[in-house]
């Protein structure tokens, strides 16, 4: 077991317990998050293996990789055994993962569910510390034509220019739109302002035959769909 190798270098472990060898023998999915991070940092300290060090780092942020990706070089260096080079390696790997997810989202050809919208928008706004309101424009096959930030920094009726929303929709020949905004607080419940904006845009769209299909409130790990909750 990995726990029995505390204080030993990876090279001295049983072959099945070495993260690099384990990846080669069993594939990347067989490795835990701690083992993957151990490969990144290469070694631990005299009294702690790379895997145990990785477990300690993960435990400090509730084993949440999103939180790990937000740590700075200086914050990572507070862990004994993590120097600047190792901290940079961790940050680089997680940033590449975030960008990969974003590229995959951009390649989604069609919106088939609220979850599909979440997968597209979460990498863009899910981890922001301020609110942003976006519009996703769709064609009659529910394929994404364009995504546009409507406002930033807050969410009130005065920040939503209905004319601009539907001017862009007409320019794109969009037949439907999806509203999206994030809640940095992590709370998913829609506010009165959220409901007012949704109704305002829905009514405006009806006169132009452009449907408001959904309004998603997005947080770091979850979302609320007006359509799924029958609020549209």
Image (cartoon, rainbow, N blue to C red):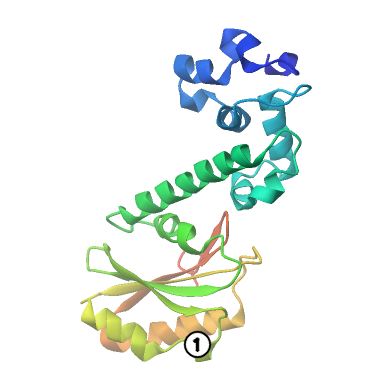
- Work out whether 197 lies above or below 40: below
- Work out whether 77 lies above or below 200: above
Residue shown at 42% from the left, 89% from the top:
161
Report which residue position mark 1 lands on.
Answer: 159
Neighbourhood count class around disc 1 (C-alpha, 10 Å): few under 14, some 14–19, many 20 upward:
some
Residue shown at 49% from the left, 69% from the top:
226
Decide if residue 123 is in sight here: yes
Quarter of the image that includes the C terminus: bottom left
Classify residue 82 as left or right of residue 203: right
- For residue 204, what is the image quadrant? bottom left
Residue shown at 57% from the left, 83% from the top:
193
Residue shown at 67% from the left, 38% from the top:
83
Relative image position of residue 231 (x, y in whole percent)? 50, 73
- For residue 76, what is the image quadrant? top right
Relative image position of residue 25 (x, y in whole percent)? 46, 14
Residue situated in front as seen by the camera: 137 or 98? 98
Quarter of the image that includes the N terminus: top right
Residue situated in front as seen by the camera: 89 or 193? 89
Residue situated in front as seen by the camera: 134 or 116? 134
Classify residue 118 as left or right of residue 146: right
- Work out whether 65 lies above or below 106: above
Residue situated in front as seen by the camera: 19 or 186? 19
At numbered mark 1, what does the secondary structure look like: helix, strand or loop?
helix
Q: Residue lying at the far right in this picture: please name it.
A: 47
């Amino acid at each position: 077991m990995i726990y029995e190798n505390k204080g030993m270098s990876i090279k001295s472990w049983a072959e099945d317990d070495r993260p690099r060898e384990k990846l080669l023998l069993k594939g990347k999915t067989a490795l835990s998050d701690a083992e993957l991070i151990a490969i990144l940092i290469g070694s631990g300290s005299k009294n702690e293996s790379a895997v145990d060090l990785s477990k300690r780092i993960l435990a400090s942020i509730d084993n949440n990789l999103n939180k790990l990706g937000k740590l700075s070089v200086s914050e990572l260096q507070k862990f004994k055994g993590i120097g600047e080079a190792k901290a940079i390696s961790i940050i680089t790997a997680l940033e590449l993962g975030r960008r990969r997810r974003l590229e995959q989202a951009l390649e989604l050809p069609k919106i088939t569910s609220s979850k599909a919208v979440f997968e597209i928008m979460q990498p863009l706004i899910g981890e922001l510390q301020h609110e942003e309101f976006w519009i996703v424009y769709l064609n009659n096959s529910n394929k994404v034509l364009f995504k546009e930030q409507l406002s930033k920094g807050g969410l009130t009726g005065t920040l939503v220019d209905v004319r601009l929303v539907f001017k862009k929709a007409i320019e794109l020949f969009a037949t439907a739109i999806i509203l999206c905004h994030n809640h940095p607080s992590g709370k998913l419940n829609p506010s009165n302002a959220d409901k007012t904006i949704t109704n305002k845009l829905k009514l405006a769209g009806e006169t132009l035959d452009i449907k408001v299909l959904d309004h998603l409130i997005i947080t770091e790990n979850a979302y609320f769909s007006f359509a799924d909750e029958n609020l549209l």
